[in-house]
Image (spheres, rainbow, N blue to C red):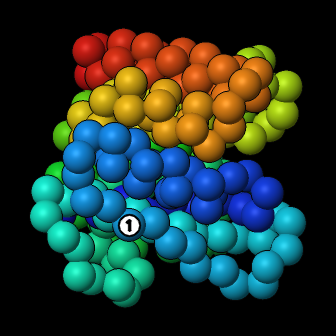
Amino acid sequence: MFQVRIHGRGGQGVVTAAELLSIAAFVEDKHAQAFPSFGSERMGAPVVAFCRIADREIRSREPVSHPDALIIQDPTLLHSVDVFSGLNKQGYILINSRRTFADLGIDDFVAKFPPDHVCDIGATELAVKHVGRPVPNAALLGGFAAISGQIQLSSVEHAIMEKFPGAVGAANVKAAQEAFAAVSKIKEEA
């Protein structure tokens, strides 16, 4: 079983990202579950969502405490919430930021992981470019497909179009595609 924890803030599409990830897994005939964990339910409050992907039925229902991958939609959470708690030492880290790990103050921490398992990408900028709104979830899922190899980009595209048919979905697919290409290039250089 592959477990993903997504950290962000209310209004960034954290819960939708987990749902889309589970749909992408279903497209590949895998089992998946997605669910959120809310604190105070308001715009801008920290939000965590979880997704599990497996080849067989998933019976676990508790929050993901030992993730194989982290998707961090808001880098301001890095020093206010323990986003790295329980992360597998061979785990994947994808952060929505154009700043370097040193600028984010986490370069010593991420140095403990395989270089091709950690990546930062300006997903918010990609969302604004393609969608016209600062909602980075679709772009980050494209990046997740590239960094982890757990799902195919085509499955992410299918999930996005199923959830958001029409122009909104097509714009989000473009953001996911650009993020996939960018993260693939970063992985090759690592």
One can see residue 106 in this view: no
Element under label 1? strand
Check disc 1: other Cα within 10 Å, few if <14, some if 14-19, many if 20+: many
* Residue depicted at x 32% and y 61%: 32
Quarter of the image where one finds residue 104: top right
Along the horizontal axis of the image, is 49 left or right of 128? left
Quarter containing the C terminus: top left
Q: Is residue 169 above or below residue 7?
A: above
Please name whichever residue, 189 or 3, is drawn nearer the observer in this view of the structure.
Answer: 3
Expressed as whole percent of the image width and height from the top left, the position of residue 181 reads 43, 14
Q: Is residue 27 above or below residue 132?
A: below
Q: How many marks?
A: 1
Along the horizontal axis of the image, is 84 left or right of 59? right
One can see residue 185 in this view: yes
Expressed as whole percent of the image width and height from the top left, the position of residue 57 reads 18, 70
* Residue depicted at x 35% and y 18%: 184
Expressed as whole percent of the image width and height from the top left, the position of residue 101 reads 49, 39
Please name whichever residue, 164 or 174, is drawn nearer the observer in this view of the structure.
Answer: 164
Quarter containing the N terminus: bottom left
Please name whichever residue, 146 or 187, is drawn nearer the observer in this view of the structure.
Answer: 146
Expressed as whole percent of the image width and height from the top left, the position of residue 112 reads 24, 50
* Residue depicted at x 38% and y 32%: 155
The amino acid type found where label 1 is placed reads: Gln
Q: Is residue 151 above or below residue 69?
A: above
Q: Which residue is mark 1?
A: 33
Along the horizontal axis of the image, is 152 left or right of 19? left
